[in-house]
Image (cartoon, rainbow, N blue to C red):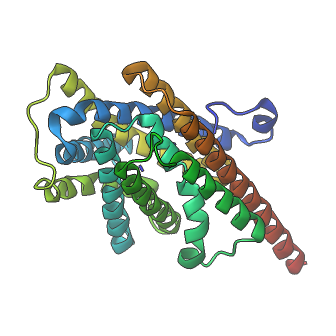
Amino acid sequence: MSGDKATAPASFAAGLPEEALRGIGLIAAGFGIVTISDAAVKWVLPEIGVAVAMMVRGALGAMTVLVLAGGLRVRAVNKRLVAARSLLHCAVTVTFYLAWSRGMPLGDSYAVAAVAPLAMTVLAIPLLGESVGWRRWLSTLVGFGGVLVMAQPGGDLWRWEAAVLLGGVVFMAVTRIWTRVLALTDRPATIAFWLMVAHIPFGLAVLPLFPAIGWPSLSGWIAILFVGIGNGSAHFLFARAFALAPVGVLAPFEYSTLVMGTFVGVLVWGDVPSWATVAGAAVVVAAGLYNLRRAQIRAREARARAALARG
């Protein structure tokens, strides 16, 4: 689970090489597709259940990645980390599917998911040995304050599903950090393929907890196609985008799902977010973007020091 603007300002785009601009186009398309795919799974969940939806996503998604990859080898190099990341991401998928099956709006779930970049800031310290300055610590604390605004007692997100989803978002942050590690050894298509495959046995494992509900309707079958093919296509586009452009350029576009998901939720289900959700999400997004900006500045400073040391 466990989504920035859909377009970049002209001055920003003009300063980027062609490959980075292609990466922006791919990442924007990927987030658009995954938003529609998430809406499709939310639509069909009442008909097939959480476990079956996971297996469908895995089977169709894996085939889609293979087709789009054009026969590229998908054998993993760092097998243990690929497996661990895939299974942990499956657990994240369960938290999102559970929240949607319990009626949580797409926009609300994406508002909670916006916490992931803040969690990455904190988790990168023990997992990657990164250092975080006082500005990013302060910004992260402010961002988590935004979570408290969203989850205030009596609000739309004052529900146990939101707490479960927040835990899933923390796990999602771990999987993203592991993706950065895996990029050193494994192809992006390999990472995406095995993620999709892992959904099949994981779905079977949780089937006793989330039994199949019934046979889908015609609209349900159409939604199932969007779920599987859409997820596979989106993850393939993400992989290609990060191969073309730096993470710092693409990361802000993740927040586009918050806007698109809210729009789709209003259009399809009439889910209008509360003021607390909007205000809290705005704080979380602002903190995440500030942390990203500070990380970029620190990276440039480190490169400048290294260049100076080389003489």
Q: Which residue is drawn at 76% across and 59% down?
A: 294
Q: Position of residue 148 (x, y in %)?
A: 56, 53
In the depicted view, which residue is nearer to us: 283 or 291? 283
**Res. 237 in view:** no
Residue 207 vertical placement versus 268 (above, below) = below
Give the left or right position of residue 264, taking residue 86 as reference: right
The answer to whether residue 151 is above or below residue 47 is: below
Q: Toward which corner of the image does residue 15 lie, by quadrant? A: top right
Question: Residue 127, image x and y in percent?
Answer: 53, 76
Q: Give the residue at x 32% y 36%.
A: 103
Residue under the image location 41 percent in, 21 percent down: 270
- Where residue 172 appears, as percent x and y from the top left, is 44, 58
Vertical side of 48 occupied by 124: above or below: below
- Where does residue 183 sit, x and y in percent of width and height? 51, 63
Answer yes or no: is residue 177 visible. yes
Spot the residue most to the front: 154
Q: In which quarter of the image is the C terminus?
A: bottom right
Closest to the observer, 39 or 24 = 39
- Label total for image: 0
**176 horizontally vs 198: left or right:** right
Which sits in the foreground, 141 or 68? Answer: 141
